[in-house]
Image: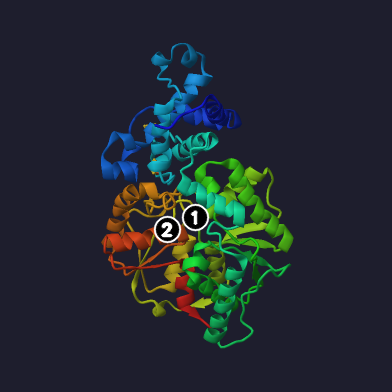
Amino acid sequence: MKKLTEEQRRKALEVFENFSDSKLLTHLNSCVHCGLCAESCMYYQVYKDAHYVPAKKVDMVSSIYRRYHTLSGKLVPWLTGARDLDEEALEEMIDLFYGSCTICSRCTMHCSIGVDIGYLVRIGRAMLAGMGFVPATLQSTVDAAINTGNNMAIPEQDLIDTLKWLEEELQFEVNDEKAGIPLNVPGKDIMYTLNPREPMFFPLSIAAMAKIFYAAGESWTLSTRMYDVTNYGYFSGNIQEATAIAQRLYDEMEHIQARRCVLAECGHGIRAFRWEAPNYLGKPFPFEVITSVELLAEYIRQGRIKVDPARIPEKVTLHDPCNLVRSGGVIEMQRYILRKSVSDFVEMTPHGADNYCCGGGGGQLSMSEYNERRMKITGLKADQIKNTGAAIVCTPCHNCVDQLIQTNAVYKLGVKIMTLAEIVADALILE
Ligand code: SF4
Ligand code: SF4
């Protein structure tokens, strides 16, 4: 069992001071134990074990809060359900907050009175991060981003070499030697970001976006100094590290003086930079921040690019990334894009804001110690995909792509996993 020092306990309880706003108090004290959130959670649906009822996560945080921040909790803890933050509680917290939650917030949406369970899980993770108990696997991803500027520690020259190769391929494909992937050019309309998984494992998704920018005649650039859209500090719960990562992208936008920051297909990265970073940094952005999903919809709507759905005759379904859709409000645009770009689009059941997580969210893909659970809960997603009869699963998130590739292999689905940019690039009419 892990040992807990007084100093670590103090650090964990400090989190309550830092979040001592009415939102925290409201959500900590509102659960009426109706149990309605149980069936909304993939973990509970698969394991049918009370340990995985989302309300248990609410209880964990609120019982510790009561023990140290209320008079009755201090005087008669056994009467109020208040709980000591001791070694036993610590083990349970690690398992509940890191080991059995993708922070998908599906339970939040289904809670009978609107308790923001995802937010309380993040409070629980912030407490664990304060005590130094972020799983080493997840922390190494954060460390790579802090120490090298990208979460896969890709050296800048390797990135440049990959992008130069992709540029040559693009010029060959569109038969135009002026087609390019502009690097570090100041004053452009758009600075485009990447998920480091792209240059590392999926360079063709960068090629797809470059082809679309070419077709749209866009004024754009990539920064090889800072391009990483991800922020695993958001998942670890370490707000200082999440802030440092967000600050780098902010600084690069100021440095390169682009008008718009376009966030690549990455659900949590979009949430962390677009919606959380202004709070981390304590100021609004002086530049526009949009997602590539919104940009692609804009191009099609304005006629800046043309697509031919006949080029993709296969049945295509869509996986909704939780942070982009349920928590980010980008729901209809990817559907608009797919209806324009493919011949046969079919929805999963359920879909949109009610969709299930892929199973790899919340940093689960980084935390190999929980792989068995991750691959078990993704069985729900596998069933959803099977039931559509689709040959292609599109998802605008590279983390989801990674998880769905594993789901595809383990559950023998025989589907192709594609990003939205890859679909649009395949359907693109180059004039
Ligand atoms: S956020 Fe998602 S994974 Fe976590 S408890 Fe709620 S439904 Fe379950
Ligand atoms: S649905 Fe909401 S109120 Fe009901 S048990 Fe779950 S968290 Fe508590």
**Can residue 347 be seen in this snapshot?**
no
Mark 2 Cα shell of 10 Å, populated few (<14), some (14-19), many (≥20)? many
Dividing the image into 4 quarters, which one contains the C terminus? bottom right
* Residue drawn at point x = 42 percent, y = 58 percent: 400
Which residue is labeled 2 in the image?
400
Q: Nearer the viewer, residue 141 or 324?
A: 141
Question: Is 393 left, or right, of 431 in this rendering?
Answer: left
Residue type, label 1: Gly
* Res 222 → quadrant: bottom right
Residue ID at (47%, 13%): 72
Q: Is residue 338 above or below residue 78?
A: below
- Give me the C-alpha separation between circle 2 and circle 1: 8 Å
**Mark 1 Cα within 10 Å, few/some/many (few <14, many 20+)?**
many
Q: Residue 223 at what x, y percent from top left?
A: 65, 65
Q: Position of residue 133 (x, y in %)?
A: 48, 38
Residue occupying the point 51% across, 44% down: 236
Residue under the image location 54 percent in, 69 percent down:
301
Return the x and y of residue 125 as percentages of the image width and height: 49, 38
Q: Quadrant of ligand 2?
A: top left
Give how far across and how far down residue 383 sits, in percent: 27, 57
Residue at label 1?
Answer: 267
Q: Secondary structure at mark 1?
A: helix
As helix, strand or loop, the secondary structure at mark 2 comes to helix
**Residue 206 appears in view:** yes
Look at the numbered discs 2 and 1 and tell me whether their residues touch, using CB distance below 8 Å: yes
